[in-house]
Amino acid sequence: MRVSLEQAIAELKKGEVVAIPTETVYGLAADATNDDALKKIFTIKQRPADHPLIVHIGDIDQVDYWVTAFPDIAVKLAKAFWPGALTLVLPAKQHVSRVVRGGESTVALRVPNHPVTLALLKQSGLSVAAPSANLFTQLSPTTASHVEAGLGEAIPVLDGGACNIGIESTIVSVAANGQWQLLRPGMISEEDIAKIANIKPANVAAQTTPKAPGQHALHYSPRTSLILFKDKPALIKESELLIQAGLTCAALLIGDGDAPNCAVVRLPNQPDKVAELLYGTLHSLDAMRVDRLLVELPPSAPAWSAILDRLNRAGHR
Ligand code: AMP
Ligand code: MG
C-alpha cells in the first residue's frame, strides 16, 4: 500500500512500521525509541532478535543523543560521508533500546542520502531503525514494488523511486579509543575510509572493536539456486550441461564477451552500475522461475569487494 510522506510520519508516530526509500536499499522503518514498534520489524522480517538494527538519523547533531563517545575519527568520517552510505557503530548510551542494539553495547547510526527520507526525518523529528525491507536472508529491495512483492501489499510503502547506490551501506565500527574496523563492505571502500581516518584499521584478531552480528553466510539470496562462475567460458560450459540434462537457466554477465544459449542480462563492467542494478536484475532473473541462475563474478579487485561479498552470500549453498 503506497502512502504519502504525511501518512508515513503519522504511521511511524503511532508505532507502526513503514517501508522507506534510501539510496542503498528500501528499509523497513520503525521509531527507534519505541520497543513495541521495533519488535514489529523483527516479526515481519522473521529476523533473529540478536541482529542489531541501523538507526537512521536526520543530522550529525543527533549522534550525541545515542552515543557515549564520538571519537575524532568517527566525526571526520561522518563529516566526509554523511548524508551517505556509511554506517558508524559507536558505544551506545544506556537509554538506547536493547531491541535496536540486538543486545550489543553499541549502536549503529547513519544519515541516509535520500531526499524523501531526509524530509521524513527532519519533518517528524524521529529517528528510525530500518533494516532492509525484505524477509530475513532474501534479496534486498531497491524499488517499492520489490517491497510489496516480498512483504505483501499490506505493508505501507513510501515510494521514492529506485535506489541509486543499490547495495547496503558500508559499516565501520569505531571504538572509544578511535580504533576502527570495517564490519561490512559497501560502495564506500575500506580505502576511502582509511584515507579520511588517516590510520589503518585495527587488527581484527586484537578484537578491540565489536564484531558484526548478523553477517550470515547465506544472505541476499534469490529463491532460484544460484551458481557463481569466475569467467564466461566456465559459465557457458555449465549452461550447456544443464540444457543437455533438460534443465532451464538464466545468466547474469558482466561486460562484453560470449553468452550462453539462455536468457541473459548483461551489466556494464563498472562497479557503481553493477551495484545499482544488481538486486533489480536478480529479482527479475528470479521471477523467470528457471532451474538455475548462473552468475559471472567480477574480478577480485578492491573496487568490486562489496559486490563480491553480496554475490558470494547469495550463491552460498
Ligand atoms: P541491515 O540493516 O539488515 O542491512 O543490517 C544491519 C547490520 O548492521 C547487522 O546485521 C549488523 O551486521 C550491523 N550492525 C547493526 N548494529 C550493529 C551494532 N550495534 N554492532 C555491530 N554491528 C551492527
Ligand atoms: Mg538486510
Image: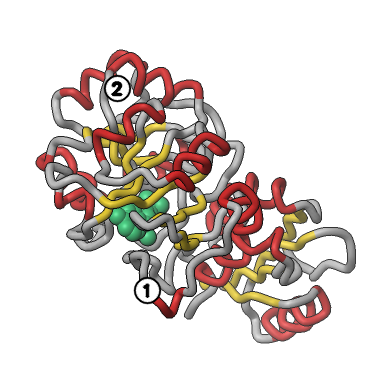
Identified by mark 1, the residue type is Gln
What residue sits right under mark 1 in the picture? 207
The chosen color scheme is secondary structure
Residue lying at the far right of the rendered structure: 257
Residue 272 in the image, given as x and y percentages of width and height: 70, 47
Q: Position of residue 27 (x, y in %)?
A: 38, 40
Which residue occupies 50% across, 76% down? Answer: 316
Q: Pointers 1 and 2 in contact (CB under 8 A)?
A: no
> 203 or 301: nearer the eye?
203
Q: Which residue is mark 2?
A: 8
Q: Can you tell which quarter of the image residue 18 is in?
A: top left
Residue 310: image quadrant is bottom right
153 in relation to 310, above or below: above
Other-residue count near label 2 (Cα within 10 Å), few / some / many at <14 / 14–19 / ≥20: many
Query: Measuring 66% from the left and 86% from the top, which residue is drawn there?
Result: 245
**Which of marks 2 and 1 precedes in the sequence?**
2
Q: Tell me the element at label 2.
A: helix
Q: Disc 1 or disc 2, which is closer to the eye?
A: 1
Q: Is residue 48 visible?
A: yes
